Structure formats: C-alpha cells, structure tokens
C-alpha cells in the first residue's frame, strides 16, 4: 500500500508566510524523522524540522529554505512490517498516481538508487502529474528507504519554482545522511493517527430509514478499506487514504465497487468522541452520527 495521505496532500498549493521561519535557523544536529530513522540537518543547507500548519497542525516535516523563501518540505512515514521490497511498493504507488491524475499527465522524470552513510538503501522516483480536476502540473520526489528490517517513505514536495529546481539535489544530499537513531537525538513525536489504527464496526440509519452497517479498517500506512452493507446486503467497498487533524478525519477515495468516484472522492467526518475502543463520528454532509467499536 502507498502512503495516500501524502499523495493526497501534495496537491495542496502551499501559501506559507515568512514569519514562520523568522525564529528558526539551520541545524547541525541529528533529528529522528520516523520511528527508527534519523537524518543529519546539515549546516550547508537551511533546514528546519517544524509544523507547517497548511500541511498538518501536529506533524513535523523537514522544511527547506532560502532565506525567508519556503522552498520545499519532506514528510516521512514508517511502513508496516513486511514492506521491504522497493520495486513492489513503487509500482503500486505509480498505479495509484495514475488513478488520481488526469489521463496522460503522469511523467516519470527520473529514478535511481543509492546507499546512505548509515547503510540504508534508498530508491527514488521523481514524477510530475496533474491531479484530477485540476490544470496545474505538480512535481514530487518520492523515496523508499530501507535497512531490510524496516522501511520508510520520504515525500518531497516543492513549494516554489526555486524549490522545484533544487529539490532533487538537496533532498538526496539530506537523505544520504540517513542512519539509525542514537540515544542523544531528539525523539519522534507520535503520529496523530496512531491511536486510531485498527478495525472499527458501527451502524447508522440512513435518510431512507435503512440500517447501514459500516466496517472501517484504518491502517498504519494511512490507507483505509471500507465496506458498507444496507439491511444486511453488501452495498459498496471502497479504499483510499486518510489523515486526522483537529478531531476530523479526512478521507480520499481512490477505488470503489461499484465505481462511484464522481459521487464520492473526498469526505470529512468529525470525531465527536474517542475513548480508545469507542469512536463516534458525525458525517458532516448529513449530521448522521455513527458509533464505532474497535475490534480487539
């Protein structure tokens, strides 16, 4: 499975004011960017590890600057156990990008592989495409990073024309420093979504007074699978990506049976209550409340 959260959020047009960088500076320290993965923040580049509110209000990303110009950001995530094959993951990611892009707009700009100083193997692709429903071409550099015990993703997205020009050279130079964390470097903040990972069951009564049974599987790679049954008969199966911010779950639907992409592509639900094994969602488009129980 690919990391749909990043795939979805890369289409956001970043408008970020320079005051966020005013109190930041370049570091020469090591920084944990995912559980089990650290990088060096080199003095030769102007880098910060910080929250970018337009991207996520709780998750730190690596930000690249040129003075007060915000040039690019890199978001990191750890893949679930067992994802060790770079070629397999990249093939699946390319398939997903094709599905989420305007027909014929996807282009593979470059690809390659190298080894970090910390003996991680890195495979990358640099791509451009036009998201469905848009006209502007997007660019992204995607890395699959592994030490053959654990694997990670690094999604680098330019936020300016200058950032697009330096994206590959600077990000590769950063990721060449990838290494295992040591005890004296800054620990990673837990991802907002971690406590929600699992299988959730619930039901609600729809506008036609029919009982709808819903099963969500929220996965560690920030993808989901969903099955809906109406009055005991399977109605639809969907999958895609999700992220959680400010007590809201944002869903991006990429696949569906029956095919219903025009009617369901993006959706936001409010988390009105969460207690570990019970979650109450409010469907924002109808104010319907779903009580979900987590499978043990």
Image: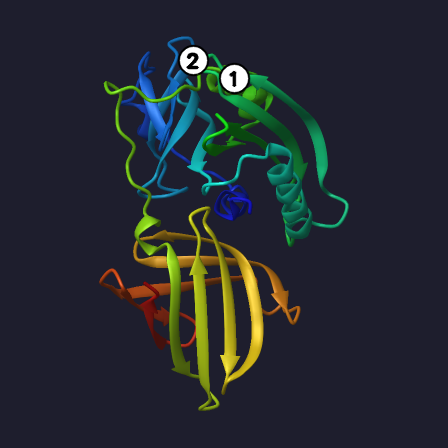
- Give the residue drawn at x 41%, y 77%: 286
Residue 24 in which image quadrant: top left
Looking at the image, residue 98 lies above or below residue 88: below
- Give the residue drawn at x 41%, y 19%: 179
In the image, residue 86 lies at what x, y percent?
A: 60, 33
Residue 58 in which image quadrant: top left
**Cα–Cα span, label 1 and label 2:** 8 Å
Residue found at the very far top of the displayed protein: 44
In the image, residue 119 lies at what x, y percent?
A: 48, 16
Residue at which label 1 appears: 170
Q: Name the residue nearer the viewer: 130 or 108.
A: 108
Task: Describe the colour scheme in one phrase.
Answer: rainbow
Query: How many marks on residues?
Result: 2
- Give the residue drawn at x 46%, y 81%: 212
Instruction: Find out whether the residues at labels 1 and 2 contact each other: C-beta distance under 8 Å.
Output: yes
The quadrant of the image that shows the C terminus is bottom left
Query: Mark 1 vs mark 2: which is more N-terminal?
Result: 2
Residue at which label 2 appears: 45
In the image, residue 168 lies at what x, y percent?
A: 58, 21
In this rendering, would 171 be left or right of 185? right
In the image, residue 151 lies at what x, y percent?
A: 48, 33
Looking at the image, residue 116 lies above or below residue 74: above
Q: Name the residue nearer the viewer: 25 or 244.
A: 244
Residue found at the very far bottom of the displayed protein: 209
Q: Name the residue nearer the viewer: 18 or 277.
A: 277
Dot 1 crowding, Cα within 10 Å, few <14, some 14–19, many 20+: some
Dot 2 crowding, Cα within 10 Å, few <14, some 14–19, many 20+: some
In this rendering, would 134 be left or right of 23? right
In this rendering, would 124 be left or right of 174? right
């Amino acid at each position: 499975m690919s990391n749909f959260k990043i795939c979805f959020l890369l289409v956001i047009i970043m408008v970020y004011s320079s005051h966020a960088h005013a109190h930041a500076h370049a570091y020469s320290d090591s920084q944990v960017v995912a559980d089990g993965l650290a990088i060096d923040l080199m003095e030769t580049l102007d880098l910060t590890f910080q929250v970018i509110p337009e991207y996520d209000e709780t998750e730190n990303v690596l930000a690249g600057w040129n003075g007060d110009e915000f040039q690019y950001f890199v978001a990191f995530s750890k893949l679930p156990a067992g994802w060790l094959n770079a070629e397999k993951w990249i093939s699946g990611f390319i398939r997903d990008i094709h599905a989420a892009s305007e027909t014929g707009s996807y282009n593979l700009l470059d690809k390659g592989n190298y080894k970090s100083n910390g003996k991680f193997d890195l495979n990358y692709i640099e791509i451009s495409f036009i998201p469905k429903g848009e006209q502007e071409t997007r660019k992204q550099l995607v890395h699959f990073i592994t030490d053959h015990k654990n694997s990670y993703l690094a999604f680098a997205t330019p936020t300016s024309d200058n950032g697009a020009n330096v994206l590959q050279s600077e990000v590769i130079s950063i990721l060449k420093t990838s290494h295992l964390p040591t005890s004296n470097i800054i620990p990673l903040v837990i991802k907002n979504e971690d406590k929600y990972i699992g299988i959730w069951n619930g039901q609600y009564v729809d506008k036609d007074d029919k009982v709808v049974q819903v099963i969500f599987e929220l996965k560690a790679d920030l993808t989901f699978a969903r099955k809906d049954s109406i009055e005991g008969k399977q109605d639809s199966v969907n999958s895609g990506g999700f992220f959680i911010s400010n007590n809201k779950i944002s869903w991006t639907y990429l696949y569906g049976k029956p095919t219903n992409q025009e009617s369901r592509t993006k959706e936001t639900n409010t988390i009105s209550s969460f207690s570990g094994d019970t979650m109450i969602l409010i469907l924002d488009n109808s104010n319907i409340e779903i009580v979900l129980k987590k499978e043990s």
